[in-house]
Image: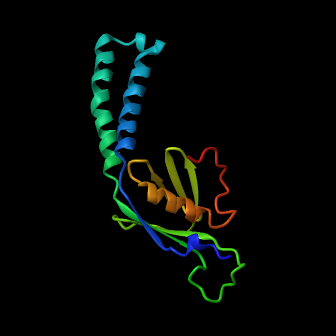
């Protein structure tokens, strides 16, 4: 029986910067500043320097948040390699391929692997350094299912160990 779950491809998913990730980056900057102030080396600093570090942590956290939110939105197109070829036999091994098209024009295309570590879904392009991260607030349930179907098109689609697929 043919696998009907791959007949609906190609699939296009829209990506946008995650507010969850932005607030996480801001919280991380604040925690780094507070942990630096909690060290023994910070106790030797004058009180004015300690106050300056504490006061500069908030603007630095805001800049970290803005940097995450300033990422260009994009579109991720998914397809199974060979799915549209009439010459490919049914038993031939198909590789998942993706095409990442951000608004800033620096995209990537080719084979990719999916790693899902709840609540984050990470798609890595194997020939390059491009990585697309989907947080729960940037990917709807149907998009998450489409990514899972796409990655499960072949048994060896994702060589990365799956710790948790939620």
Tell me residue 98's x, y (percent): 52, 68
Tell me residue 139's x, y (percent): 42, 54
Residue at the extreme front of the image, as rendered: 1
The reply, left or right, for residue 53 in relation to residue 164 is left
Residue at point 64%, 49% (across, down): 162
Residue at point 46%, 15% (across, down): 39
Residue at point 39%, 52% (across, down): 138
Residue at point 59%, 65% (across, down): 127
Of residue 149 and residue 134, the one placed in the foreground of this image is: 149
Q: How is the image coloured?
A: rainbow
Which quarter of the figure is the N terminus placed in? Answer: bottom right
Quarter of the view holding residue 151: bottom right
Of residue 64 and residue 84, the one placed in the foreground of this image is: 84
Tell me residue 74's x, y (percent): 37, 63
Whether residue 137 can be seen here: yes
Quarter of the view holding residue 93: bottom right
The reply, left or right, for residue 70 in relation to residue 41 is left
Q: Image height check: is 56 above or below 124? A: above
Q: Image height check: is 42 above or below 78? A: above
Whether residue 125 can be seen here: no
Of residue 74 and residue 130, the one placed in the foreground of this image is: 74
Q: Image height check: is 118 above or below 111? A: above
């Amino acid at each position: 029986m043919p696998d009907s779950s791959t007949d609906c491809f190609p699939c296009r998913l829209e990506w946008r910067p995650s507010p969850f990730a932005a607030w996480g980056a801001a919280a991380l900057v604040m925690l780094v500043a507070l942990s630096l102030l909690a060290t023994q080396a910070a106790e030797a600093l004058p009180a004015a320097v300690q106050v300056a570090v504490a006061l500069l942590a908030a603007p630095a956290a805001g800049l970290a948040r803005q940097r995450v939110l300033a990422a260009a939105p994009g579109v991720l197109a998914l397809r199974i390699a060979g799915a549209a070829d009439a010459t490919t036999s049914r038993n031939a091994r198909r590789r998942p391929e993706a095409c990442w098209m951000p608004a800033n024009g620096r995209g990537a295309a080719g084979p990719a692997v999916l790693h899902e570590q709840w609540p984050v879904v990470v798609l890595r392009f194997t020939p390059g350094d491009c990585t697309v991260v989907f947080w729960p607030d940037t990917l709807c349930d149907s998009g998450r299912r489409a990514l899972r179907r796409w990655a499960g098109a072949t048994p060896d689609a994702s060589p990365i160990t799956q710790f948790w697929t939620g």
